[in-house]
């Protein structure tokens, strides 16, 4: 029997490695940007076409490469960052594994132009599926330009599994933001299909955050800084009132490398524990500087996971630093036990000699029994008690005593059990408890309805119907509102624009990353929410629903708008509003459950009530 184990060809091995390193266009963007940083560039341009499927081009003004280096960089495990095993414990560069360029060249058509400052001419290399198609001298600026065309052209299965262009573009923007935040002193730009998405000049960390996420973030940031013998921590956290219900604005950098770490993320969430609900996530951009010998970054091919020698101490430092920053800027309550507050109200800026005690004056000749009432007051009393005109048709006031009360009627509730039908008078009198629940009498006991869950169910089914028939009515705003989104959210909003209009929004594009809202759905006309906030919450809720529940686009959109538009717990309702709410609830397909799957209606039977009273 012949031997069956053999070495794979390099082209096949590179394609297998590419499955781990390059999962989507954003993965190639990350690797190319990190190589540009390692080359010492201070100006980096990223050009993308068709969300990276057609072209990804990174142009830098770094050190460039020689002819030999340009050819060697496409070989597996070829790197300039590591020479011996000990170097793995002192890594300060972004890349070191030597797999990225070989993996990208195995699944795309790559063109590289590079030139060192001391060379007169540069080098052009064209590679297609790990095969070098052309190599020749060329005139080119100093630095390196790498173009990745037709990604996954020879692995159609992987290309078919890519998401839509707006989704893939959002992943690219996420990677671009992470690299740009890590190096604020470097100039970056991003172009997609000929449109400029970002132009970031060299700046401070705070300026870079504002440039990436918008001018309104300038007032949301709280600085954090801590120096210890274990780590040096610096960066910014967000004020609690600006926390969002979706993740995406949480950034940890270790030695300027973006990482994902649930353990350290828990340290920050614990610091916000008393300030935020459980489903809200604060903004933070934190940089940890640590001795490379105390960490291991060679854990995963994407290099986003790190192992620490003293993880618990790092956790404690981050938690205390964030907690102190929140208290220092009066975000959370702090106690100063050295100050006696009992005397704080007695402090006065006046000098002691200027303080005059109050004086008392009185009239010794005053006789209360001899005083006469003012004429004005006498006139007032005469007017108040003067007999008025005789009431006409006074006998009709007693007709109500002859009114025969109608018998109590029952209302059919559809899916609700026959024994749990409402018992109501013709006026349908309901009672609201703590402005949260609506209580009604039923034949077998008492029914409680969660008003917020009920309204969410009503709006959800109504919005789904609008999305299906494309006939959502719009109520025009008196003054159109503009909303400026982050580039990622703007791309998402553009992909949802047709469905958003079907819900009843009158929205159009208005410049870079800006939309104009000229109308909102008629169903929301009675709400007092600001149009801009409503639209921002709609996008945030959509992302949250898609991430956690993996819903369809229309379902996630309907859920998001229903949650943000429904009446909230604590809202007082009139009898007419309660009547309408209950009627519309039992007209729904699934009135018993909220859109999150939890009960919207609870019943307490007479037997359960009797048991509570021990009868």
Image: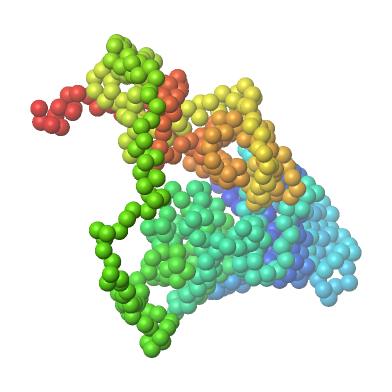
**Is 4 above or below relative to 60?**
above
Q: Residue at x 62, y 58 (%)?
A: 216
**Is 425 above or below relative to 550?**
above
Q: Horizontal and vertical percent for residue 430?
A: 34, 26
Q: Horizontal and vertical percent for residue 414?
A: 39, 15
Q: Can the viewer see residue 339?
A: no
Q: Split into 4 quadrants, where in the image is the C terminus?
A: top left
Q: Horizontal and vertical percent for residue 501?
A: 66, 32
Q: In the rendered image, which quarter is residue 162 located in? A: top right
Residue reaching furthest bottom?
Answer: 353
Q: Residue at x 76, y 64 (%)?
A: 60
Q: Can the viewer see residue 459?
A: yes
The residue lying toward the viewer, choosing from 128 and 546, is: 546
Q: Horizontal and vertical percent for residue 365?
A: 28, 69
Using residue 152 as the reference point, say whether residue 440 is left or right of it. Answer: left
Q: In the rendered image, which quarter is residue 503 located in? A: top right
Using residue 391 as the reference point, say whether residue 495 is left or right of it. Answer: right
The residue lying toward the viewer, choosing from 245 and 32, is: 245
Q: Residue at x 30, y 58 (%)?
A: 371
The residue lying toward the viewer, choosing from 16 and 565, is: 565
Q: Residue at x 31, y 25 (%)?
A: 440
């Amino acid at each position: 029997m012949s031997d069956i184990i053999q070495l794979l060809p390099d082209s096949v091995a590179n394609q297998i490695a590419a499955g781990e390193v390059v999962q989507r266009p954003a993965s190639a963007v990350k690797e190319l940007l990190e190589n540009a940083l390692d080359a010492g560039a201070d100006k980096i341009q990223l050009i993308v076409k068709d969300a990276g499927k057609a072209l990804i081009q990174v142009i830098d003004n770094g050190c460039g490469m020689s002819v030999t280096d340009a050819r060697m960089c496409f070989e597996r495990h070829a790197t300039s960052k590591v020479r011996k095993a000990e170097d793995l414990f002192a890594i300060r560069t972004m890349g070191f594994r030597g797999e990225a360029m070989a993996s990208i060249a195995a699944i795309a058509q790559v063109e590289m132009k590079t030139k060192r400052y001391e060379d007169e001419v540069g080098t052009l290399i064209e590679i297609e599926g790990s095969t070098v198609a052309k190599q020749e001298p060329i005139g080119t600026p100093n630095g390196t330009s790498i173009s990745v065309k037709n990604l996954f052209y020879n692995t159609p299965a992987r290309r078919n599994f890519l998401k839509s262009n707006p989704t893939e573009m959002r992943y690219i923007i996420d990677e671009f933001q992470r690299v740009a935040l890590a190096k604020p002193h470097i100039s970056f730009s991003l172009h997609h299909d000929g449109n400029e998405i970002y132009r970031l000049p060299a700046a401070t960390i705070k300026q870079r955050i504002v440039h990436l996420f918008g001018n309104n973030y300038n007032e949301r940031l709280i600085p954090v800084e801590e120096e210890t013998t274990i780590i040096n921590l610096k960066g910014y956290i967000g004020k609690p009132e600006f926390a969002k219900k979706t993740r995406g604005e949480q950034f940890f950098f270790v030695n300027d490398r973006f990482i994902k770490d649930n353990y350290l993320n828990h340290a920050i969430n614990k610091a916000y524990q008393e300030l935020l609900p459980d489903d809200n996530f604060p903004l933070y951009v934190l940089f940890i500087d640590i001795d490379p010998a105390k960490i291991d970054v060679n854990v995963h091919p994407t290099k986003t996971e790190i192992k620490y020698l003293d993880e618990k101490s790092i956790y404690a430092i981050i938690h205390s630093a964030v907690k102190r920053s929140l208290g220092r800027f009066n975000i959370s309550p702090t106690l100063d036990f050295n100050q006696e507050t009992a005397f704080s109200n007695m402090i006065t800026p006046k000098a002691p000699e200027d303080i005059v005690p109050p004086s008392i004056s009185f009239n010794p000749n005053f006789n209360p029994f001899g005083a006469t009432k003012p004429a004005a007051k006498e006139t007032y009393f005469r007017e108040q008690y003067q007999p008025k005109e005789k009431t006409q048709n006074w006998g009709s006031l007693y007709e109500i005593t002859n009114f025969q009360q109608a018998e109590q009627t029952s209302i059919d509730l559809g899916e609700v059990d026959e024994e749990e039908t409402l018992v109501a008078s013709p006026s349908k009198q309901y009672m609201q408890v703590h402005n949260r629940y609506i209580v009604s009498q039923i034949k077998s006991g008492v029914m409680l309805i969660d008003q917020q869950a009920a309204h969410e169910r009503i709006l959800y089914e109504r919005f789904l119907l609008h999305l299906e028939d494309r006939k959502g009515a719009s109520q025009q705003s008196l003054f159109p509102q503009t909303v400026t989104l982050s580039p990622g959210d703007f791309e998402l909003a553009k992909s949802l624009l047709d469905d958003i209009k079907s819900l009843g929004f009158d929205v159009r594009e208005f410049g870079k990353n800006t939309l104009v809202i000229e109308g909102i759905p008629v169903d929301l006309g009675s709400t007092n929410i600001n149009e801009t906030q409503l639209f921002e919450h709609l996008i945030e809720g959509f992302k949250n629903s898609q991430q956690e529940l993996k819903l369809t686009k229309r379902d996630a959109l309907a859920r998001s708008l229903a949650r943000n538009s429904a009446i909230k717990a604590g809202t007082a309702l009139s009898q007419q509003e309660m009547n309408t709410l209950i009627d519309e609830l039992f007209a729904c397909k699934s009135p018993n459950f909220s859109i999150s799957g939890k009960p919207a209606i609870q019943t307490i039977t007479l037997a359960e009530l009797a048991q509570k009273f021990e009868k």
